[in-house]
Image (spheres, grey):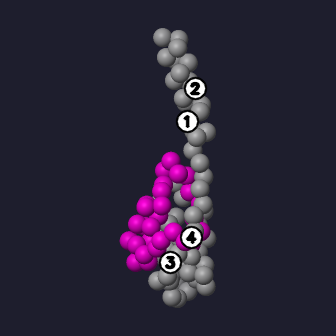
Amino acid sequence: MKKLLAAFCLAAVVGPALAATQTVTLSVPGMTCPACPITVKKALSKVEGVSQVDVTLEKREAVVTFDDTKADIQKLTKATKDAGYPSSVKH
């Protein structure tokens, strides 16, 4: 029983430490006007785990910082697509 309790306590402490913050740059070629980045930023900001979004009309890209235990690239690209702005990872 003590070993089980110790393992549980260790998992509770180490688990959150394994979460990683990631940053990805998405290409959003459909942005053509000054209102587009506002819409894209709002859509990405609503994704659980996203902590920061910077959208640039001139570069037609969005730089997104997120917790990879709560969000992933598929959720981010789905959010932009659902807002009317399909995106892909910029390499």
**Mark 4 or mark 1, which has the lower sequence index?**
1
- The residue type indicated by label 2 comes to Leu
- The residue type indicated by label 1 comes to Gly
Instruction: Characterize the local packing of mark 2: few (<14), some (14-19) or many (20 or more) Cα atoms within 10 angstroms.
Output: few
**Mark 2 or mark 3, which has the lower sequence index?**
2
Residue 81 falls in image quadrant: bottom left
Q: Quick check: is 90 in the magenta stretch?
A: yes
* Residue 41 visible in this rendered orientation of the protein: no
Residue 90 located left or right of residue 78:
right
Between marks 2 and 4 in the image, the one whose residue lies nearer the viewer? 4
> What residue does disc 4 label?
91
Instruction: Give the Cα separation between the discs numbered 4 and 1.
Output: 30 Å
Q: Looking at the image, is 32 positioned above or below residue 88?
A: below
Instruction: Give the Cα separation between the discs numbered 2 and 4.
Output: 38 Å
Between marks 4 and 1 in the image, the one whose residue lies nearer the viewer? 4
Outermost residue, left direction?
82
| Residue drawn where x is 49% and y is 82% of the image | 29
**Mark 2 or mark 4, which has the lower sequence index?**
2
The numbered mark at residue 28 is 3
Q: Look at the numbered discs 4 and 1 and tell me whether their residues touch, using CB distance below 8 Å.
A: no
- The residue type indicated by label 3 comes to Val
Give the extent of the magenta segment: 62-91
Instruction: Characterize the local packing of mark 1: few (<14), some (14-19) or many (20 or more) Cα atoms within 10 angstroms.
Output: few
